[in-house]
Amino acid sequence: MAEILLEVKNLKKYFETPRGKLHAVDDVSFSIEKGKTLGLVGESGCGKSTTGRVILRLLEATDGEIYYKGKNIRDLKNNQMRDLRKEMQIIFQDPFSSLDPRMTVSEIIEEPIKLNKIIKDKEKRFERVLELMDLVGLSRRLMNTYPHELDGGRRQRIGIARALSLDTKFIVCDEPVSALDVSIQAQILNLMKELQEKLDLTYIFITHDLSVVNHFSDEIAVMYLGKIIEKAAAEELFSNPIHPYTKALLSAIPRPTIDKKIDKIILKGEITSPINPEFNCRFANRCNYAEDICKKKEPEFTKRSKDHYAACHIF
Amino acid sequence: MNNKVLAIHNLKVRYLTEDGSVEAVNGIDISVDKRKTLGLVGETGAGKTTTALSILRLIPDPPGEILSGNIELDGIDLMSITEKEMEKIRGDLVSMIFQDPMTALNPVINIGEQISEAISIHQHVTPDEAKKKAKEMLELVGIPGARWAEYPHQFSGGMKQRVIIAIALSCSPKLLIADEPTTALDVTIQAQVLELMKELKEKMDMSMLMITHDLGVVAEVCDDVAIMYAGRIIEQGSLKEIFKSTKHPYTEGLFNSVPNIDDRKSELKPIRGLMSDPYNLPVGCAFCDRCDYALEKCKTEKPEKIYFSETHFAECHLYKENIDFQLNSGKN
Amino acid sequence: MSENTEFVKTEQLLKTKKRSQIVDVWRRLRRSNTAVIGLILIFIFLCMAIFAPVIANYEDDALKMNVRERLQSPGIGHWFGTDELGRDIFARIVYGTRISLFVGIISVSIALTLGGTLGAIAGYYGGRIDNIIMRVLDVLLAIPTILLAITIVAALGASILNLMIAVGVSNIPGFARVVRAAVLSVKDQEFIEAAKAIGARDHTIILKHVLPNSMAPIIVFATLKVATAIMATASLSFIGLGIQPPTPEWGSMLAGGRAYIRDNMYIVLYPGLAIVLTVLSLNLIGDGLRDALDPKLK
């Protein structure tokens, strides 16, 4: 029986705004096995990035439980959490703004080690930085360059090296390749997969790009307006999508081929506001199949088949 | 000749910066037929946006300058007309929509007025007539005309992009240049906007130059495709020719880099290395360092255009001796 | 998989120095003609201040009253002439430079440290802390700077120390605001979040990541404030609340020479020129720095 590294139960994150409570993350639950990848997919405003940050306690959850290796980390005090951060890390989307522009490549990678006093000896620390640079494919010559002198792909490698510099076991990857050119995306994705195998890492891969997550995940959860509306093993989700939103999402992806002409499901309307949402299906206003019950009652997240869950009244 | 709305010949654009000179566009020939869509594909730094700006003569000078080349738009030689005449053409004969809808609209003017402004500049109409036309344009792009008095911040990203399309099309241009129009949008919104653009192209009987790095978008909307790399068009052809008979190794590399949603198991084969330093372009083929098929002469000699059909060419040494050479993907 | 992984010796790499960002800024600053003029002028004044004892003798030239030599026009013996009490004006200008620059720099340092800390805390933590700090400083800001300085000097007595305190304190709100704004502009950037994610504590984040990246507007502001501090010093001394005679200070020299402006205008001309030139040079440098530090103009 595989070990469950991370488990999230009924996670909620609400923000107070002048217009009311913004339900960014609304009762989200899932678990990830060690060494596996959970893809968290959705469009802008669905709450996936917020979920990632709440898991790492970079933002404090409003409610719910987060279990890492069986322990509820929401109970931890600041210094205990700091200890845990040696194992739980994050890779950011923007390879530019996520690196301190005044620090060189080696300084950026070295900082977590220095801060946490993992290696006190300067020379040994330096050796470790070089090791990490080799691991992520950064030429050692780049040691003293600044981020702005490098392209997006290399900068993202720096971010990855930094995330790996401690005794990392679990990484929240927040849209790690969205800001990169297509050919560089492929390089970084391959690198991340390699590292996962080499170092037995567990990922939660946050993205809006379904084609990327298909390639990379074992299990996929689709989010819409703060809720997970469907969850299944990757292959299962792509071959048998249940929720109308998932279907629309899959059909909307432009495919680089002229062979198959897929009938696009074009969604009507706009996404509703996450502020003070109604207690009905949040997707109802855009759904081509919506019926009365959808506008009145929130659908339950139920098991449809082995490891395949969805929240929908109609399907 | 007259069935072309745009004909560019040997365009060279250079930027002079304090770090050196960048040959952003290195001698390209493109043409767009009437009522057709040409996709201009390439990654960051390939020179696509520079090409688009050249057509509108919006290259900031300094530091940029158009070194040479002809640009003919609907029969008019754009290099020989004055700035005043050019102003009449921008927005009227040719329009452009940019990538980021969030910053392309003026936040303090309502959207109806922004559309009317485009109309009033080019057509002699009363303010009321302009307003009426603006409302019509809004309906055309799927926004209720009653919303003309609202401000940009009241619209979402996708709707802002529709407004921008409305502005661009308000004077029924013959050519619409779209610079990555859907890159900043969510996938489902992108689908909506692309669908809209396809509809409008038919309705308004116009041609499009679609700049993108997304081959999926190209497959959706384009009739012809030109692939750009380091300032040169390294392959060009009809949609079918490019997708089914890929000739240039870079084009093949692009196809291999894109995760195929319908084939999970396939491995991603990224193109190794990085695009060459624009300040220091190599002597031979610019793609040489990253090419798995590179020959000795690729390092020192620039490849010439090899034609595979009337419409399909590639700049590559591989085909000079052997026109039937096949790339590994064997997309033939 | 990895590109060009050369196994360069570790020791070699440790020795290579990183291209200092300060060098970059200096190079860009040098490109502005006006900034260079400002730098040259300030350099001259700095030399005058540092080498004052070499240039002129304090006791004999600047302080000693010599009624026989009073009101002499500029000439060979006295380059700038003598004032109403027979003292050499040039020598007094030279020693006055010391005071002006000293008070200017120290008072700005006081304001920067105290105001900057308050601003950084307010900006970083936001919420109620921000509110409380900024509203208190708003009260201070509502009082005209000169009036505030006068009040402090009047209460504590006129001395160089109190002068520095007065000018320093009156500048605290301004610095708090600038630092707060700079901190706000940086703190929501992802690399700050990244620092939190690797376990950095708040004070480390502020000192190591936030402030170094928000230095540009603060440096420009500080440079310009040294100029206003010099003017404030001169103004206070002019009205008798700053440096007390016979200590040479440009403002008090202006005050002393006022009566003689018609026939011996050189008595006020030179101190006036000194004030104008120092303030001007600092403003030119400040403007040049603003452009040199602007990342968008790279």
Image: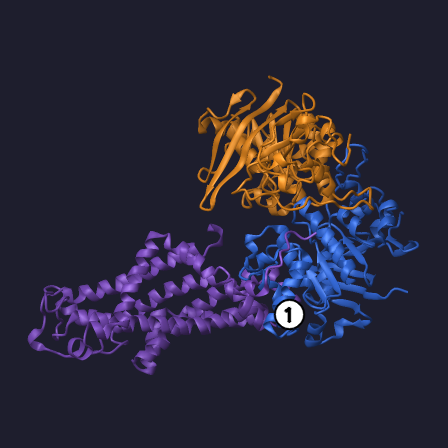
Q: Position of residue C1 (x, y in %)?
A: 70, 51
Q: Establish if A204 lies above or below B309.
A: below
Q: Is residue B258 left or right of residue C164?
A: right
* Residue A75 seen: yes
Q: Residue at x 11, y 74 (%)?
A: C86
Q: Nearer the viewer, residue B316 or B181?
A: B316
Q: Position of residue B327 (x, y in %)?
A: 74, 34
Residue found farthest to the right: A305
Q: Chain of mark 1?
A: A
Residue found farthest to the front: B296
> In the figure, what tint was chain B given?
orange
Residue highlighted by disc 1: A113
> In the figure, what tint was chain A given?
blue
Residue found farthest to the top: B2
Characterize the local packing of mark 1: few (<14), some (14-19) or many (20 or more) Cα atoms within 10 angstroms: many
Q: Secondary structure at mark 1?
A: helix
Q: Establish if B309 lies above or below A160.
A: above
Q: Nearer the viewer, residue B94 or B38?
A: B38
Count the marks: how many? Answer: 1
Q: Position of residue B171 (x, y in %)?
A: 58, 28
Identify the image quadrant of the N terminus of chain A: bottom right
Q: Amino acid at mark 1?
A: Ile
* Residue B56 seen: no
Residue B310 appears in which quarter of the rendering?
top right
> In the figure, what tint was chain C given?
purple
